[in-house]
Amino acid sequence: MVNIKKYQSSDLEELISLFFQTVHTINKQDYTGEQLAAWAPEEERETMAASWGASLSRNISFKAIKDGRIAGFADMTIAGHLDRLYVHKEFQRQGIASALAAALESEALKFGIKLMDTDASITARPFFEHIGYQVEKERCILKNGVELINYRMMKRIQKN
């Protein structure tokens, strides 16, 4: 059973650690070591706290709790951009991402948002397609001097 709760600033360090662990373990199936180091560089871990703390507090942000631990987190801007969705490496394929996405979509409806978008990694693309997102375009972005492929994806949100 997963429990979705609102993000609290006291969660920040754990979410940053979860992000680094997930990127460097789960995403290695689709990205090179050089790409992973550019995406989630260890030397930027400390500087991320300020920027992530500000955006997670400003955005609509949730954490997923399972077995007493933070199993994942996700956030969305008030304009409907799903900014981050990460699931801990030990909680993959247990419905955590789906629960987080559903919570964000429910909030989007409350705010009158009818179209959500995200920039999905190669690894995350099949999940987003499974929950109804469609690829708008493949993109090659430059992150810390290294090229990474991701996908701009969109979903129309409607009441069930």
Image (cartoon, grey):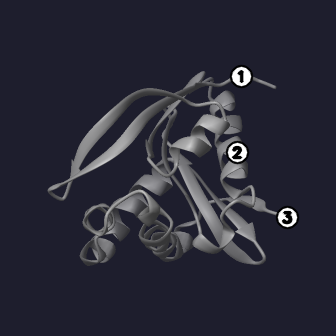
The kind of residue on which mark 2 rests is Ala
Q: Mark 1 points at which residue?
A: 158
Q: Which residue, as the protein is rendered here, is positioned at the far left? A: 145
Ranked by sequence position, the earlier of labels 2 and 3 is 3
Number of marks in the image? Answer: 3
Badge 3 local density, few (<14 within 10 Å), some, or many (20+)?
few
Q: Mark 3 points at which residue?
A: 1
Badge 2 local density, few (<14 within 10 Å), some, or many (20+)?
some
Could you tell me residue 78's position as x and y percent? 51, 36
Could you tell me residue 4's position as x and y percent? 73, 58
The kind of residue on which mark 1 rests is Gln
Quick one: SS at disc 1?
A: loop
Q: Name the residue under label 2.
A: 103
> How far is the residue under mark 2 from the one under mark 3?
15 Å
Quick one: SS at disc 3?
A: loop
Name the residue at 60% across, 35% down.
129
Q: In which quarter of the image is the C terminus?
A: top right
Name the residue at 61% across, 45% down.
127
Q: CB of mark 2 within 8 Å of CB of mark 3?
A: no
Name the residue at 57% across, 53% down.
74
Ranked by sequence position, the earlier of labels 3 and 1 is 3
- With respect to residue 89, does 60 lie above or below? above
> How far is the residue under mark 3 from the one under mark 1?
25 Å
Could you tell me residue 109's position as x and y percent? 68, 28
Q: CB of mark 2 within 8 Å of CB of mark 1?
A: no
Q: Nearer the viewer, residue 55 or 157?
A: 157
145 left or right of 122?
left
The kind of residue on which mark 3 rests is Met
Q: Which of 20 and 54 is in front in this view?
A: 20
Name the residue at 24% across, 77% down.
43
Quadrant of residue 32 within the rendered picture: bottom left
